[in-house]
Amino acid sequence: MSLGRDVALATATGTAIGFTYAAHAPVLPLISRDFGLSDVQAGLISTAIFLAAAATMLLIGDLADRYPTRGAVTFGMALTLAGNLASALAPSYELLLLAKAIGGVGAGFGFIAGIRYVQRRYGDARPHFGQGFYGAGYPLGSAIGFWGMPPLALLWDWRGAFAATSVVIAIVLVAWLRATPVTRVAGRGTMLDAARCLNCWWTLVQHAAGFGLVFAAGTWITTFLVRDFSLPLAAGGLLGSLLLVIAVVARPIGGFLVAREHVSTVAIMRAAQLTILVGIALIALPDRPLLVALLGATALGLGGGIPYSAVFNTAAASLPSAPSAATGLAALGGLLGTIIGAPAMGFAIQTWGFSWAWLMLGAISAAALAVTFVMRGEEAF
């Protein structure tokens, strides 16, 4: 296969995994009805997949360096498919949680292996542009989950919706059998080496203030628009989805800018956090008009998306002996930002109001901005 087709396949993989992150969310009322779940129990479904993905990245992320990269991606996709299909068949709430956890393991392993595949597929060339497309698949897949699952559930109920989408994931899995093999570079290091790498921790902070911040903001943006501007729910959801859509577009743009050496990796991370801070200032402004709030949300999506390839290629360069372990540590930041950020925003909204919730995200972004003045970019290695 050509380089373009391999990158497209990697992007489809990111889209499939990103879909499984969010597919259950729009059909939670139906799942709760069938299993008689409380709001807390329903919320734990998301926790199952994200915690499993985080544990996989933290504990066994380095395995992606020890096996052929194409096979590692295929293995991750197989587990992702198994988790999605098992979700359709789960006879009880407990087994549904197990199914989502299996999918989370596949998502975590597949994510790291996919990053390494794109990096190795480019050989000695800079992989940022292709990496940006791969990364764009994740928010795109989540958006497809939010938009696509409700109409499928209307046709076939939530179980049928999971079963139908499993067919698409299976097609992506089979396509990996024809992907171009890449040169294997066996890593000598482990996750313990990544834990000792200070620059790897700085990339974790950057991804927490990128993907983690955008996902946390995306969790509450619709509620914010509905409450503060009295919009209908459908209009609030449509306008709120702009945040994810902008993040999808921003990732390959950021990769292109770095690949063409228009900007350094650290510079684009710094610019991203400045953009996020401008966006938060616009959203948190008292009595701001709707247009200003939407401009702020656009800035959030742009700032959260453009540094993606810079962050992960810097992570891999920071630890040549175990690039997948370093990548896994950076990826963990995004998941932790999501797991902690969304409920923390909820607490701030309930206690002090939306402005304080946005300012809390601003504090995270300000910390990430400060880190850009002490960390090293990919070019320094």
Image: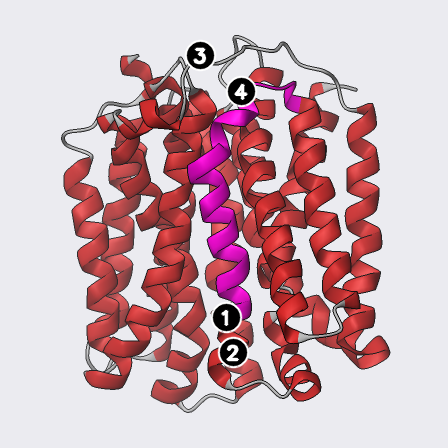
Is 103 in front, or is 13? 103
Amino acid type, label 1:
Leu
- Mark sitting on residue 269: none
Is 67 in front, or is 285? 67
Residue hosting label 2: 41
Based on the picture, tell me whether residue 245 belongs to the magenta stretch. no
Amino acid type, label 2:
Gln
Q: Is residue 380 left or right of residue 322?
A: left
| Lower position in the chain sequence, tag 4 or tag 1 | 1
Amino acid type, label 4:
Asp
Label 2 crowd (10 A; few <14 / some 14-19 / many >=20): some
- Mark sitting on residue 188: 3
Residue hosting label 4: 65
The alpha-carbon separation of the residues under discs 3 and 2 comes to 41 Å
Label 4 crowd (10 A; few <14 / some 14-19 / many >=20): many
Segment tinted magenta in the rendering:
44-69
The alpha-carbon separation of the residues under discs 3 and 1 comes to 37 Å
Whether residue 292 is visible, yes or no, is: no
| Label 3 residue SS | loop
- Mark sitting on residue 44: 1
Is label 2 in contact with label 1 (beta carbons under 8 Å)? yes
* Quadrant of the frame with the N terminus: top right
| Label 4 residue SS | helix
Q: Position of residue 179 (x, y in %)?
A: 77, 24
The alpha-carbon separation of the residues under discs 2 and 1 comes to 5 Å
